[in-house]
Amino acid sequence: MTEFEQPARARLDLAALRRNVRRVQQHAEGTPLMAVVKADAYGHGVEHVVPVLRAEGVCAFAVASLAEGARLREMGVTEPVLVFAGPLPEALPAYARLGLEVTVSSPALVEAVLASPERLRVHLKVDTGMHRLGVAPEEAPEVLRRLASAPHVEVAGVWTHFATADAADPSFAREQLAHFEAVARAAPEVPVHLANSGAIAHLPEAVRGRAFIRPGGLLYGLPTTRAVARALPTEPVLQFASRIVRVETVAAGETVSYDRTWRASRPTRIATLAAGYADGVPRSLSNRGVARVHGRDYPIAGRVCMDALMLDLGEADVSVGDEAVLWGWNGPSVLAVAEAADTITYALTCGLSARVPREPVGR
Ligand SMILES: *Cc1c(COP(=O)(O)O)cnc(C)c1O
């Protein structure tokens, strides 16, 4: 540690990442894996995650934007990279130059791709009920025919995305699947893919015999629901921790932090932890979350501040410099923290800010 190091940090257990990849691969019974590494690998850092995935034989990657795709190419990634968001038409030359695969996600993009002078590899996105991106299932067969007949266009896939695959009730996912099957039947020669983590866990029909699965969260050990965690158990890759910078006793009746929302019912020791919402601790954990010190969980007292939060230690023997784990291995489970914060696990790791260093550790 250097003198000026900031105490909040995200440690990465890359061996856990490797084991998660193998678990997901095994569960998917050999369907090839297109690893989703958007948002800097869900906040973990593509520079740490992607080399491990490549070494594990991941054969394709997906990202959210052209900039994220360019970053993978700068890192020397030679595998196919699909960009989920449909591009603005003026970006098509950059896709061709970088060899990134284009998501054709609207009728206007169909026309832009057909009119482009560039050689493009494209995947058609079909909107089966998420209503975010994609062309209507009824239009898809005709669009696929037009794309396939354009000499400068290679149709590398057709795909859709589930709105509810991580829920225990698969009924809406089955409706989406039925719309998608109609498209797949109309274009039997085109590779298809549709399973995100929730579908990989719950919906074998979306996995078996498809060109790819598209897991993100489960690679990082981030289940979205308890049902997903049960169906396909994985380990957290990331541990978010910081250090205690002050311990003081407050008297009964005293309040802690902004707005005085927490009041001591007895004399108690209060630890100040150097981690706040500017590091990625959700402010919604105010008076609701915990942090683990020496194997014990202590409640967050009062509002989470920008750079600090306070813990109610009671009588516990905790000292300045001790470490507190906010979530991840050797700490509270990321799923429990997400529930307490009224968010999802992905938002926790994606919310870790740039000032939190990501550090691979050998475990
Ligand atoms: C983010 C994303 C995924 C991965 O979802 P997980 O739930 O993290 O597995 C797959 N497909 C699309 C289109 C996505 O946007």
Image (cartoon, helix red, strand yellow):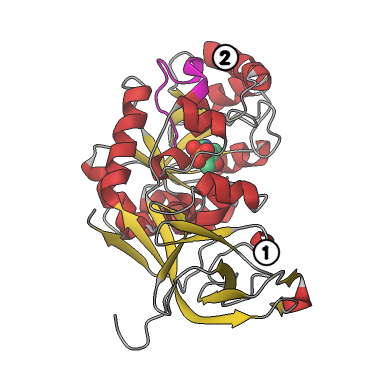
In the displayed structure, 278 sits above or below 213; it is: below
Q: How many marks?
A: 2
Residue 68 pos. (x, y %): 45, 56
Return the disc, 2 or 1, that comes first in the chain's sequence.
Answer: 2
Crowding at dot 2, Cα within 10 Å, few <14 / some 14-19 / many 20+, comes out as some
Q: Nearer the viewer, residue 236 or 293?
A: 293
| Quarter of the view holding residue 324 | bottom left
Q: Is residue 204 magenta?
A: yes
State the SS at label 2.
helix
Residue type, mark 2 in image: Glu
Q: What range is drawn magenta here?
A: 202-215
125 vs 253, left or right, is left
In the displayed structure, 325 sits above or below 106; it is: below
Instruction: Please identify the dominant SS of the magenta region.
Output: loop
Q: Nearer the viewer, residue 149 or 241?
A: 241
Q: Which residue is mark 2?
A: 181
Determine the residue positioned at 39% across, 73% down. 322
Q: Is residue 78 magenta?
A: no
